[in-house]
Image (cartoon, helix red, strand yellow):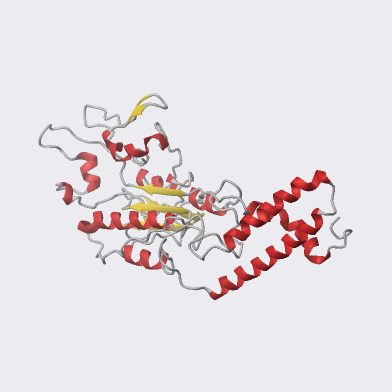
Amino acid sequence: MLQALGLGAGAAAMGSLLPLMNASGQEKVRPRRLLLIFQPDGAPARDWNNVIDWRPQGSESSFSLHAIHAPLEPWKSKLVIPWGLTMTAGGAGEAHAYGMAGLWTASTLNGPSSGANFDGGNGSRTGWGSGASIDQIIAGAHGSGMPYERAPDDPMQETPYRTVELGVQCLNPNSLNRMIYAGENSPIHPETNPRAAFNRLFAGVTPTGEAPAIDQGAEQERTERKAIVDLLKSDLTRIRRRVGKEDYHKLDAHLEGLLAMERRLNQPAGPADPALSCTVPEAPVETSGRGSDYPAEIRSMMDIAVAAFSCDVTRVMSLQLSYAFSHILHSWLGHTSDHHTQLMGLETSSIGNRKRDSGPLSGLV
């Protein structure tokens, strides 16, 4: 129809661009995000005689949190706390090994091979996991309502990193110490140095409120978009005089979309949506990876994760705290035995009871 009206190539191209232009005039919403967090060896579900039930108490919409979840009280209305999960994925090795491999992949742990032969606990030998983890599957998907609307091979990605893998004192790569997989026999190793993670993720990121450096390429693109908007506005005005009244509302809607785009293009350059509250934390101090550095490194990695989301550095992330057989000594809590031993069988002098390991899933909160 546009060519029949003799309005030229600019108006003809407008026919295919109008839906996009109209959509661009709408307010952007913050994207969906995914963060997987692992803590080792579960959480105490009982002492030797008494069950420790840390489920919320009450109804679905009105409930009280157990002390283990007390820090989450301000966000209680947004929480979903699953209970009674059972992981059926098994495989080579013992529970800690195939638990790590199956935790986010729901796949079995392979037996040893020429390229991967690890101690899977209690003398059992293992290889790597046999499937992709859920974060990688989600990051590979795209479309409306997902973290990414563009495909992984799109040359214009929405974030600098499709996924980010962080860890704290995860030790050397083997089946007990890795939980994220790109696919079978393809573990992804987390960045465990907070300073290195900070330097890599926030290079070139401008916090909200600071004057960004002028990007000449971006300014040129901005100028070209303004020119296209001006052309389309002119064509719309001419078309409006030559169509029936029943089409007025469609053209008015397209014109409003173009005007909204023009308003945004005329605004001073700044951080793009959805990074409206981008705050970069202080650079972490260098640490040596000793057990006593564990709390500080966790805090640094959590700060980095929050900032990476707020600055839209990525939308899919994992944070692995320690490893399946965690032997970190939590001395800052007054413990004298390492974490795994403490949960498995430390006799308490006050009550003479034992705490029992509750398995790899119970600590997912």
Q: Quadrant of residue 79?
A: top left
- Is 60 drawn above or below residue 247 in the view shown? above
- Is 53 drawn above or below residue 24 in the view shown? above
Q: Report whether residue 193 is seen.
A: no
Placement of the N terminus among the 4 image quadrants: bottom right
> Where's residue 23, x and y in %?
65, 51
Q: Report whether residue 47 is seen.
A: yes
Please give the name of the residue rendered at 30% of the width and 49% of the height, measured from the top-left corner. Answer: 325
Please give the name of the residue rendered at 72% of the width and 50% of the height, measured from the top-left corner. Answer: 252
Most foreground residue, 2 or 340: 2
Please give the name of the residue rendered at 53% of the width and 49% of the height, measured from the top-left corner. Answer: 29
Which residue is most to the bottom? 216
> Where's residue 55, x and y in %?
34, 30
> Where's residue 170, x and y in %?
33, 57
Most foreground residue, 137 or 114: 137
Please give the name of the residue rendered at 60% of the width and 68% of the height, measured from the top-left corner. Answer: 222
> Where's residue 199, x and y in %?
37, 68
Placement of the C terminus among the 4 image quadrants: top left
Which residue is most to the top? 59
Q: Quadrant of residue 345?
A: top left
Which residue is most to the right? 4
Which residue is most to the left? 349
Most foreground residue, 171 or 135: 135
Most foreground residue, 313 or 83: 313
Q: Quadrant of residue 10?
A: bottom right
